[in-house]
Image (spheres, rainbow, N blue to C red):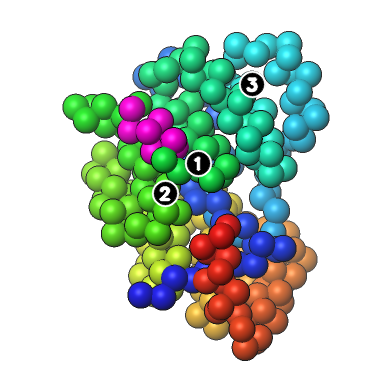
């Protein structure tokens, strides 16, 4: 089965979703807001939308409240957005010591470790935090996302199915599931799943960006543009579709995609 699209690193970044929620109580009983920009990842054509803030902006806030989990999560998120996964790991590692049983923190920490390339450690963190007796859908989906990055799509998809039993039609899980099929170039199946995710009231803009990408990869550029415009300003959506069209016209595109998927 042919592995493909994590698109060229200069413009496309593979960030398989590790579902975590921000802006919620981290006491353990509160559920994350699925619509939060941090709850889903994407194979994206443009920088992530939504307010993130720079790492510099969050540095002082973190120094003032290093024990606040929401601040730590936001700081780590900003660091990851700037490609500083190792520093995000350091921040979240300290937070994990304070809140070792928090699935939201564990998900974020596992994602940062995976982005750093430490997949084995990421799996250890996720699995240790996820109780077999009372599994958490966020951690189950996060483990799947990591296995997808390790080139184990079948094992990953089994975990997404488990997560969907725990959280039926949860868009962040469906997003991961759809991206899994995108990575193996099973685009019609990826599209069907991403359409389910995009229909959820709590789906954020990145789910629609992913759907637009999958539609565009199948050559339906105008439809992709229409979907992308719902999630992005028209100018940005137009630029993304134009870039995708130009890239797919190159004879070595799929080799580049496959290489990016393996090294991204």
Q: Is residue 216 left or right of residue 26?
A: right
Q: Is residue 193 above or below residue 254?
A: above
Q: Is residue 118 above or below residue 263?
A: above
The CA distance from mark 1 to mark 3 is 24 Å
Nearest to N terminus: mark 2 or mark 1: 1
* Residue at which label 3 appears: 71
The CA distance from mark 3 to mark 2 is 24 Å
The local secondary structure at tag 1 comes to loop
Q: Residue at x 60, y 14 (%)?
A: 68
Residue 58 pos. (x, y %): 74, 26
Q: Quadrant of the C terminus?
A: bottom right
The reply to whether discs 3 and 2 touch (Cβ–Cβ < 8 Å) is no
> Magenta part of the protein: which range?
121-128
- Residue 23 visible to an observer of this rendering: no
Q: Is residue 248 above or below residue 47?
A: below
Q: Is residue 83 left or right of residue 114?
A: right
* Residue at which label 2 appears: 145
* Residue at which label 1 appears: 118
Residue 152 pos. (x, y %): 35, 57
The CA distance from mark 2 to mark 1 is 13 Å
Residue 7, located in which quarter of the rendered image? Answer: bottom right
The answer to whether residue 125 is magenta is yes
């Amino acid at each position: 089965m042919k592995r493909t699209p994590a698109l060229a690193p200069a413009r496309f970044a593979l960030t398989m979703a590790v579902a975590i929620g921000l802006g919620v109580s981290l006491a353990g009983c509160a559920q994350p807001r699925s619509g939060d920009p941090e709850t889903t990842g994407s194979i994206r054509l443009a920088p992530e939308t939504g307010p993130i803030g720079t790492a510099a902006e969050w540095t002082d806030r973190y120094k003032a409240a290093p024990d606040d989990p929401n601040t730590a999560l936001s700081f780590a998120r900003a660091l990851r957005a700037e490609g500083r996964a190792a520093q995000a790991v350091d921040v979240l590692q300290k937070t994990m010591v304070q809140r070792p049983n928090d699935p939201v923190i564990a998900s974020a920490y596992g994602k940062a470790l995976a982005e750093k390339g430490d997949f084995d450690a990421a799996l250890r963190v996720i699995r240790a935090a996820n109780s077999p007796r009372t599994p958490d859908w966020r951690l189950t989906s996060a483990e799947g996302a990591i296995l997808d990055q390790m080139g184990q799509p079948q094992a990953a998809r089994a975990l997404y199915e488990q997560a969907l039993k725990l959280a039926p039609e949860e868009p962040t899980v469906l997003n991961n599931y759809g991206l899994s099929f995108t990575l193996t170039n099973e685009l019609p199946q990826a599209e069907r799943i991403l359409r389910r995710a995009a229909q959820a009231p709590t789906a954020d803009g990145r789910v629609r960006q992913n759907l637009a990408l999958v539609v565009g990869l199948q050559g339906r550029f105008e439809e992709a543009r229409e979907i992308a415009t719902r999630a992005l300003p028209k100018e940005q959506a137009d630029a993304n579709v134009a870039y995708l069209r130009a890239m797919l016209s190159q004879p070595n595109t799929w080799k580049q995609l496959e290489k990016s998927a393996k090294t991204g």
